[in-house]
Image: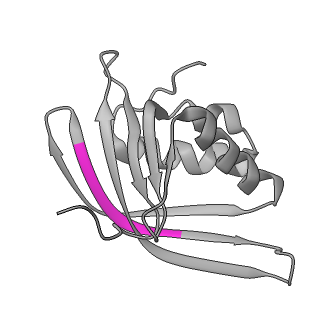
Amino acid sequence: MAAVAAETPKELSSAFAAAMARGDVDAALAMWADDAVILAADGAAVRGRENIRAALAALVDHGTSVEIELGRLHRAGDVAVATGSLTLSGAGVDGPFEQRSESTVVYARGADGLWRIALDAPWGLPPGDA
């Protein structure tokens, strides 16, 4: 899987949205860390690239548009956390839909110097363990 040249988390967010718009699941998936996690609103986790591939493919297969707006971004060395908004829209089974949520994303910079998504909470951080 070829790495996407994203030298900042902001570039990575833009490249991810562009890959999804093209329907290029492989390119979108290359932007995720090997052990990445997507956290659902209820706290359920989608773990690892192969499971994330299935989630991304489902969005593409249903013609879902992905729009990402980074709000705040904080970096500490090779880790960054961002908050912002995610808008999913498309035709839908019951007609057109648009879903907007406030999201939190953790990015990690790999040994190759490129940023990847390590943890994505598209609906914000769910309640966690204390």
Left or right: where 53 falls relative to 32: right
Left or right: where 3 falls relative to 62: left
Residue 25: percent from left, percent from top: 70, 38
Residue at 48%, 60% (x, y): give it: 44
Residue at 30%, 35% (x, y): give it: 108
Q: How is the image coloured?
A: one colour
Q: Is residue 113 magenta?
A: no
Q: Residue 102 appears in which quarter of the rendering?
A: bottom left
Residue at 53%, 42% (x, y): give it: 15
**Viewport quadrant of the C terminus:** bottom left
Decide: is 130 above or below 2.
Answer: below
Q: Residue 84 appears in which quarter of the rendering?
A: bottom left
| Magenta residues (range) | 80-86
Q: Nearer the viewer, residue 4 or 107?
A: 107
Residue that sits furthest to the front in the current view:
130
Q: Main secondary structure of the magenta part?
A: strand
Q: Tag count in the figure?
A: 0
